[in-house]
Image (cartoon, rainbow, N blue to C red):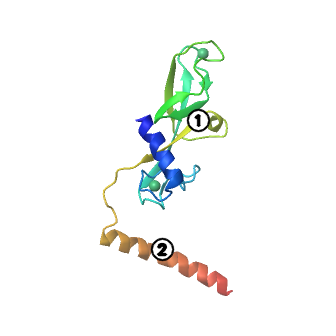
Amino acid sequence: MSITDDLINLLRVFYPNINTKCTHDKIRPDVEQAYCPDCGKLIKNEWYVTRCSCCGVKMKTIIKNGKILPQYNYCTNCGSSEFESEKIEKINFIDINFAALIKQEVEEEKICSTTKCWQEKTNEQPKLLVQYLQYQQ
Ligand SMILES: [Zn+2]
Ligand SMILES: [Zn+2]
């Protein structure tokens, strides 16, 4: 799998428009979820952190070949190589130094049926009107 990834990355250098898997680069990490402007998929930001299984200290976490791993092989606190990963529900300023971000594609049904879109548009309308009125004053 990693050989294929390397090959794709290499191909991208020469053919930037090559049709490969979208990496959803434009999704900002500070939003919970958003639609990717490049591929239109709903992307959910998920943060993960690894902890030493032995002493429980948080380890700097990286994503390698789609796996959540600690940056170093051994715990700097106790020397253990065992670790466990956990999902962070709400990222904070402390955890962000340790955590790794996974941009998860959310499998969703096509919710944008005609009715739904229409409802969203009518909801949007009053807000715009208010803003317009404020401008007038
Ligand atoms: Zn995308
Ligand atoms: Zn440890």
Left or right position of 41 against 49: left
Counting from the top left corner in percent of width and height, residue 35 is at 46, 58
- Pointer 1 residue Cβ closer than 8 Å to ligand 2: no
| 10 Å crowding of disc 1: few (<14), some (14-19), many (20+) | many
Left or right position of 110 against 21: left
- Secondary structure under tag 1 reads loop
Front residue of 82 and 88: 82
Left or right position of 119 against 28: left
- Secondary structure under tag 2 reads helix
Considering only vertical position in the picture, is 107 above or below 39?
above
Amino acid type, residue under disc 1 in the picture: Ala
- Reading the image, the residue beneath label 2 is 124
Counting from the top left corner in percent of width and height, residue 81 is at 54, 15
Front residue of 135 and 43: 43
Q: Earlier in the sequence, mark 1 or mark 2?
A: 1
Front residue of 64 and 106: 64
Q: Which mark is residue 128?
A: none
Farthest front residue in view: 14
Give the foreground label among 1 and 2. Answer: 1
